[in-house]
Image: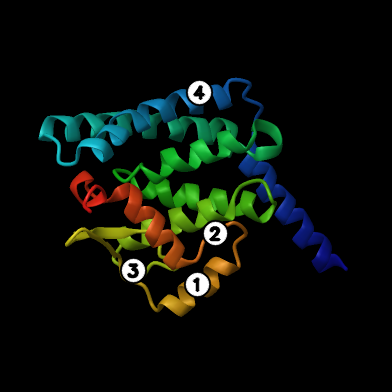
Amino acid sequence: MIRSFLLVTLTSAAFNCAVAADCPNYASDLATMRVADQSLREYFVDVGPVSRRLVNALGSIDRVNTRRMRVLLKQCGWPVTSKYGKEASANAWLLIQHADQDREFQREALLLLGQVVKAGEARGGDLAYLSDRIAVAEGRLQLYGTQFRGVENCKLVLAPIDSREAVNARRRAIPGMQTLEEYEKVAGEHITPPECRHAP
């Protein structure tokens, strides 16, 4: 009885910490940051190889967004869906997913996201993507097969996994996640260079 009470109390305390203070402009701030995040990325997808200057510009945008996300997560916690909406939570995940220059921050955010996913306040798929992003960067096998390591002969090459069967089993456990094969097909239509996508 006491053990169960303590478990509930600790879980509640962790979730309250993940939610933190009320921040009325949180969702709009995240939406504005997302626009900046996607501005050059959408251009890259459309035109293919770009100059070093544009790559550096994207890096600058990511650094500014990451610094701001650090402050927002500390002050406001994760933007849970019941309070800020699904779009705000998705935007927070996207910005953290692209915070590759601050791996420590990504790991901290992963723990926070894990808490709110367990509480049903964020998407499990977002947790899978961020988990894979960090794993691949650290040289570990990804669990959900969300990350690619490049394009060879107009085909996306998946970053290392344990097995397709194990990956698909984990994907099935997360509501809304496609099979690995479905995901690869869709990603190939959007991520590969324009000359590959437009080939007959």
Name the spot of residue 102 as percent of width and height, x first: 33, 44
Q: CA distance from mark 3 to mark 4?
A: 33 Å
Dot 2 or dot 3, earlier in sequence: 3
Residue topped by disc 3: 140
Taking 53 as reference, is 81 left or right?
A: right
The answer to which of 66 and 6 lies nearer the viewer is 66
Measured as percent of width and height from the top left, residue 156 is found at 27, 60
- Mark nearer the N terminus (2 vs 1): 1
Label 2, secondary structure: give it: loop
Query: Is residue 107 shown to the viewer in this render?
Result: yes
Q: Give the crowd class for mark 3: few <14, some 14-19, many >=20 residues within 10 Å.
A: some
Give the Cα distance between marks 2 and 1. 9 Å
Disc with the residue nearer the chain's start (3 vs 1): 3
- Label 1, label 4: how far apart the Cα atoms are: 35 Å
The residue mark sitting in front, 1 or 4, is 1
Q: In the image, what residue type sits under mark 4?
A: Asp
Whichever of labels 1 and 4 marks the residue nearer the N terminus, that label is: 4
Q: Are marks 3 and 4 in contact (CB under 8 Å)?
A: no
The residue singled out by tag 4 in the image is 29
Residue to which mark 2 is pinned: 177
Query: As displayed, is residue 187 above or below residue 64?
Result: below
Identified at 48% across, 43% down, the residue is 93
Q: Which residue is found at the position 62% from the left and 38% from the top?
A: 86
First reached walking from the N terminus: tag 2 or tag 4: 4
Q: Can you say whether 146 is above or below 143 in the image?
A: above
Mark 4 lies on a secondary structure that is helix
Badge number at residue 168: 1
Front one among 87 and 183 = 183
Task: Give the quarter of the figure containing the N terminus.
Answer: bottom right
Query: Disc 3 and disc 1: Cα gap in Å?
Result: 18 Å
At x 42%, y 42%, the residue is 96
Q: Mark 3 is on which residue type? A: Arg
